[in-house]
Image (tube, grey):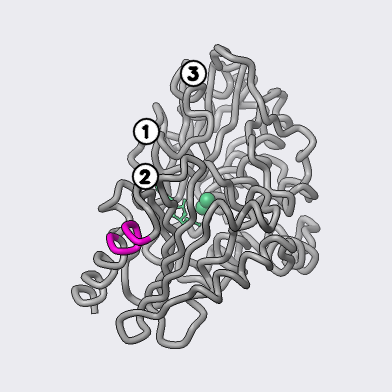
């Protein structure tokens, strides 16, 4: 699958490529990469498989073309530690470092970027993303909201600029696609998703092994949390809304690590008749909850989260709301009920 006429990235970087890309943003992105020495890669807080797979694949791709980027992911979920290049991930950056170029992946706005102070201070910034709510916060923005994963946007870019998609890069990319599509199941999966996946499999990526590692296996703490979440789950509005929550105390008691809350919102959505699943998780500052919302068929949960300063995708979105469990629940459930009535 080629977006446009491919170019030879190595020739381009050396100024020998005659076949200049027809896509202006991509040309500008390549120019920026070419002229930048100190490059850093950033992604969103509480990184998921797409955030991590995208970041590691860009790290490996930049290495391949002779750059030496920093990839900054301070909270790295243990389940992804098997991925290639994990050993190069930085959990700290020296204070006051100014990067020539900062690249944000899988982030819809600046507030989502973990390490945003470095991103903001960089001389140039690039955003590659797939959120419909992306507000184009980079100097250069390559955003495709019809792509079900940021990693899928990257496959199209890499194929276009003829990065050699090695088994390692392919493994990172397929991790992003598999996790953001729930294993090719969610709305948003396109024919291209399968075509790209087929390309990656041809590179030797082991889809069965990857699926076991990133989709099927859960940590013990995640399992313990899911027991509590099931116990507390309420069905509202005639069973169309599922609500559950988790506190910092729960996390302490089950010895939760970063990423251990992943997938818990799906428990509510899996129940027959549920259209909206709401799962809220207490934040470290205690007086706020991170909202995760999923819908099954028709409600646009991104629109609901947008009302609270968040965003995401039509069937998966998030935001932050201040207050205790009851207050936060009342606010978000009220909007969910409205959406159910309006969007039927
Ligand atoms: P989550 O429920 O955290 O898995 O997030 C679901 C989707 O919504 C992901 O695509 C996130 O990138 C997006 N999302 C989550 N929280 C926010 C937020 N505060 N602002 C914008 N997008 C968000
Ligand atoms: Mn993500
Ligand atoms: Mn994503």
The residue that mark 3 highlights is 122
* Mark 3 CB lies closer than 8 A to ligand 2: no
Cβ atoms at labels 3 and 2 below 8 Å apart: no
**Does 342 lie within the magenta span?**
no
The residue that mark 2 highlights is 134
Q: Residue at x 63, y 46 (%)?
A: 52
| Image-based side of 130 in relation to 311, left or right | right
Real-space Cα distance between discs 3 and 2?
A: 20 Å
Percent position (x, y) of residue 114? Answer: 52, 34
Q: Residue at x 41, y 58 (%)?
A: 317
Q: Nearer the viewer, residue 296 or 168?
A: 296
Prevalent SS, magenta region: helix
Rendered position, 155 above or below 205: above
Rendered position, 15 above or below 173: above
Q: SS for tag 3?
A: loop
> Which stretch is magenta?
326-331
User: How many C-alpha atoms fall within 10 Å of the one at disc 2: few (<14), some, or many (≥20)?
Assistant: many
Q: SS for tag 2?
A: loop
Real-space Cα distance between discs 2 and 1?
A: 8 Å
Q: Residue at x 70, y 60 (%)?
A: 221
Cβ atoms at labels 2 and 1 below 8 Å apart: yes
Sequence-first tag of 3 and 2: 3
The residue that mark 1 highlights is 137
| Image-based side of 158 in relation to 275, left or right | right
Q: Residue at x 54, y 13 (%)?
A: 98
Sequence-first tag of 1 and 3: 3
């Amino acid at each position: 699958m080629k977006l446009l006429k491919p170019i030879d990235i190595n020739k381009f970087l050396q100024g020998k490529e005659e076949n200049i890309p027809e896509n202006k943003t991509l040309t500008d992105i390549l120019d920026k990469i070419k002229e930048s020495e100190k490059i850093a890669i950033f992604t969103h807080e509480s990184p998921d498989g797409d955030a991590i797979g995208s970041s590691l694949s860009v790290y490996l791709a930049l290495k391949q073309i002779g750059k030496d980027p920093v990839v900054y992911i301070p909270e790295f979920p243990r389940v992804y530690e098997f991925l290639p290049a994990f050993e190069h991930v930085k959990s700290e950056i020296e204070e006051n470092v100014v990067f020539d170029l900062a690249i944000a992946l899988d982030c819809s706005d600046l507030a989502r970027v973990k390490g945003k102070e470095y991103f903001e201070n960089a001389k140039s910034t690039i955003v590659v993303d797939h959120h419909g709510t992306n507000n184009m916060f980079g100097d250069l923005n390559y955003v495709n909201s019809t792509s079900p994963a940021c990693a899928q946007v990257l496959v199209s870019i890499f194929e276009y600029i003829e990065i050699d998609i090695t088994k390692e890069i392919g493994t990172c990319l397929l991790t992003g696609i598999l996790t953001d599509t729930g294993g090719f199941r969610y709305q948003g999966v396109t024919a291209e998703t399968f075509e790209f996946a087929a390309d990656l499999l041809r590179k030797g990526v082991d889809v069965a092994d990857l699926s076991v590692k990133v989709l099927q296996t859960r940590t013990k703490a995640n399992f313990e949390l899911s027991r509590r979440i099931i116990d507390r789950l309420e069905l509202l509005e005639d069973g169309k809304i599922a609500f559950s929550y988790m506190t910092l105390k729960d996390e302490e008691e089950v010895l939760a690590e970063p990423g251990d809350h992943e997938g818990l919102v799906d428990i509510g959505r899996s129940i027959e008749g549920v259209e909206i699943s709401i799962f809220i998780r207490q934040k470290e500052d205690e007086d706020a909850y991170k909202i995760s919302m999923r819908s099954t068929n028709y409600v646009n949960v991104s629109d609901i989260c947008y009302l609270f300063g968040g965003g995401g995708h039509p069937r998966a979105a998030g935001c932050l709301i201040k207050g205790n469990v009851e207050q936060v629940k009342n606010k978000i459930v009220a909007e969910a009920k409205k959406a159910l009535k309006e969007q039927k």
